[in-house]
Amino acid sequence: MRIEKDQIVIRSAEVSDAQVLTGWWNDGNVMEHAGYPDGLGLTMEDTIQSIKGWEGKLSQLCIIEVDGIPVGELNYRLSEDGIVYPGWKICDPKYQNRGIGPKVINMLFQFLFTDPAINASIAPHRIVWDTMLENVQAQHVYEKKIGARRVRVVENAWQDQIGNWRSCVEYEIDRKTFFDNLDLLG
């Protein structure tokens, strides 16, 4: 999988990406918003096996690049009932808060709703994801820049790796709403 727009590329992760992914996944500052303030503690081999586990599937683990530099990662899982479950992170702090996130989300959603291979197999009709309750900036992006619908807040949904209870906000967007709101990103 590879999609490009302007200076942004979203492409399938390869074994050669294992070093950068291992660095991000083991960095508590990067993984805090995913509930892993101590990082994941993965070895390079763990990461390589994870990358290989996505190979040959419609669901993907991807690298986000800006001007050829890896700056983040995303993944999406396709369910047989036409629902897509994505996740994304701009991992390099130098590229955060620069408007890249909404562009990446728009590129991903447009791809998911229009890719011939995905639509011949699954025909996604809805995309569902969540974010931590304290991630107010992400909530603003999802509601105001993407046009997603806040489904609900789940209090104390799960415990993070150090025992803190975490709450999350669930979001969704359907195919029609996404295409009706494309002008939000300009």
Image (spheres, rainbow, N blue to C red):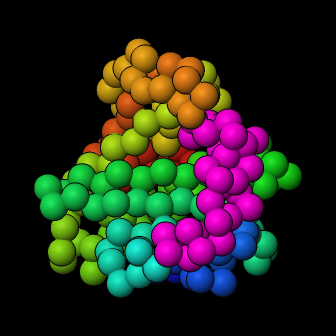
User: In the drawing, does residue 101 fall left or right of residue 184?
Assistant: right
Residue 170 appearing in the image: yes
* Quarter of the figure with residue 77: bottom left
What residue is at 41 percent from the left and 15 percent from the top? 155
What residue is at 14 percent from the left and 55 percent from the top? 81
Q: Position of residue 134 (x, y in %)?
A: 60, 22
Q: Position of residue 113 (x, y in %)?
A: 32, 63
Between residues 18 and 103, which one lies in front from this camera angle? 18
* Quarter of the figure with residue 158: top left
What residue is at 69 percent from the left and 40 percent from the top? 38
Please say if 105 is above or below 13: above
- The magenta region covers 22-51
Q: Position of residue 89 (x, y in %)?
A: 62, 51
Q: Is residue 79 magenta?
A: no
Between residues 39 and 126, which one lies in front from this camera angle? 39
Q: Main secondary structure of the magenta part?
A: helix
Q: Is residue 46 magenta?
A: yes
Residue sitting at the far top: 155
